[in-house]
Amino acid sequence: MVRAVWDDEHSKWWFSVLDIVGAINGQDDHQKNRNYWKYLKAKLRKEQNELVSATTQLKLTASDGKRYRTDVISQRDVEKLAKSIHNDRATAFLDWFTYSDNSVDGKSKKKAYALIESGLLDNMEPGTVKSLQQIHAYLFGGLYDFAGQIRTKNISKGGTLFCLAEYLMQNLNTIEQMPEINFDEIVDKYVEMNVAHPFMEGNGRSTRIWLDLIFKKRIGMCVDWSKIEKKAYLDAMRRSATDASAIKSLLRGAMTDRIDDRDVFMKGIDYSYYYEQEDNE
């Protein structure tokens, strides 16, 4: 597993250099990975490779549960690091990390799988704008320049104009303060976040994961999205700004307590992306 840490200031993920080195070299010995990175860093510095200067240090949680400062790089520099390590595993690692499917949806869908597997969701604060930005940045990092960034332009879809950009941050702050103790409050918050549409693209896919995170943390349940038919979901969401009863009914009928069931979440990702196949956000 490649550990990652969220950068609040720049709304982006940073990834552990040592974990990347270990994954590519097939090595789980921390000290050997440190030694290899020390050697590689010296080699890259001698070559005046800009990758060294792009590396920074942040605290990551280690196997002993403590947090230590370690070298990290941004998502866009992971490929450069992998290509500087000349072995057969580097290509396989990049196929896993950057995903070889040519479409944005294909790549971000696989990133959604990886996000679920990574355990990073467990450390996110449910119901916050920050956690939604973290999810969006993970799904679309390297695919959209604005991944994780709150939009500064007005957007519309199907004749619906979403929250005007000049009022968006104020609106998001209000949404963040909405209660999320029970089912109805959580869905009301989800509906308001959908109306806000904080990103230029990828709102639905990110916000459905965000919704499940809230459900899981607050009421010990999540949505089995396979139980919600696409047209019914899209129709209910279109009406939700003025009447949330339809989407509440659909979600209530699909709730499950299988919050630790990997298949439920993976299947949920499949359906979430299926909802977007013809109706682009």
Image (cartoon, rainbow, N blue to C red):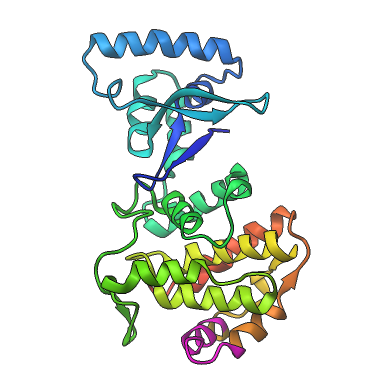
Name the quadrant containing residue 226: bottom right
Residue 21 percent across, percent down from the top left: 47, 21
Describe residue 169's horizontal placement relative to residue 50 as left or right. Answer: right
Query: Residue at coordinates 48% horizontally, 77% vertically from top-left?
Result: 192
Residue 100 percent across, percent down from the top left: 41, 45
Tally of numbered discs: 0
Whether residue 279 is visible here, answered yes or no, is no
Residue 79 percent across, percent down from the top left: 36, 32
| Residue 237 within the segment the image draws in magenta | yes
Residue 260 percent across, percent down from the top left: 74, 54
* Prevailing secondary structure of the magenta residues: helix
Whether residue 228 is visible here, answered yes or no, is yes
Query: Residue at coordinates 51% horizontally, 19% vertically from top-left?
Result: 25
Report the quarter where the C terminus lies: bottom left
Name the quadrant containing residue 223: bottom right
Describe residue 42's horizontal placement relative to residue 269 as left or right. Answer: left
**3 is higher (above) or lower (below) than 10:** above
**49 is higher (above) or lower (below) than 205:** above
Name the quadrant containing residue 178: bottom right
**Farthest residue, direction right:** 257
Instruction: Report the span colored magenta.
Output: 233-245
**182 is higher (above) or lower (below) than 7:** below
Describe residue 189's horizontal placement relative to residue 215 as left or right. Answer: left
Query: Residue at coordinates 29% horizontally, 14% vertically from top-left?
Result: 44
**261 is higher (above) or lower (below) than 20:** below
Query: Residue at coordinates 42% horizontally, 59% vertically from top-left?
Result: 105
